[in-house]
Amino acid sequence: MNTGYKQLTRSTSNRMIAGVCAGLADYLGIDPTIVRLLTILAFFTGFGGIALVYLIMAIVVPEQPTVQQ
């Protein structure tokens, strides 16, 4: 079912912890490493709320559907 819009999902193939950064990178069309580095940078430079945001996204954002062959 293709409705013409992108949906934010957690990655199941390119995940480190919960797949949030890889899913966000896929949604934005950028490299997952950039999103991961920005997340770590935000965490250590005083934006500690990023850990809470990551946890909420890991719970709320659905996983990417797997393609069955």
Image: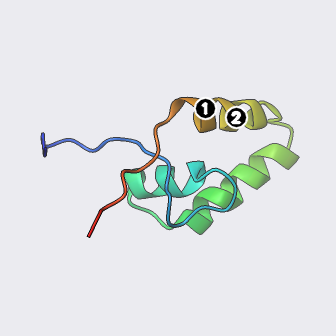
Q: Secondary structure at mark 2?
A: helix
Q: What residue type is disc 1 on?
A: Ile
Give the answer, above or below, for where 5 lies relative to 34. above
Q: Nearer the viewer, residue 42 or 20?
A: 20
Please tell me how crowded label 2 is: few (under 14), some (14-19), or many (20+) other residues with Cα within 10 Å: few
Residue 9 in percent (x, y) is at 43, 45
Residue 23 in percent (x, y) is at 48, 52
* Residue located beneath label 2 in the image: 55
Q: Nearer the viewer, mark 2 or mark 1?
A: 1
Q: Nearer the viewer, residue 9 or 37?
A: 9
Asked where in the image residue 17 lies, by quadrant, the reply is bottom right
- Are the residues at dot 2 and dot 1 in contact (C-beta closer than 8 Å)? yes
Please tell me how crowded label 1 is: few (under 14), some (14-19), or many (20+) other residues with Cα within 10 Å: few
Give the answer, above or below, for where 63 lies relative to 36. above
Q: What residue type is disc 2 on?
A: Leu
Q: Relative to 35, is 43 on the left or the right? A: right
Asked where in the image residue 6 lies, by quadrant, the reply is top left
Q: How many marks?
A: 2
Residue 33 in percent (x, y) is at 61, 67
At 36% from the left and 51% from the top, the residue drawn is 65
* Residue located beneath label 1 in the image: 59
- The C terminus - image quarter: bottom left
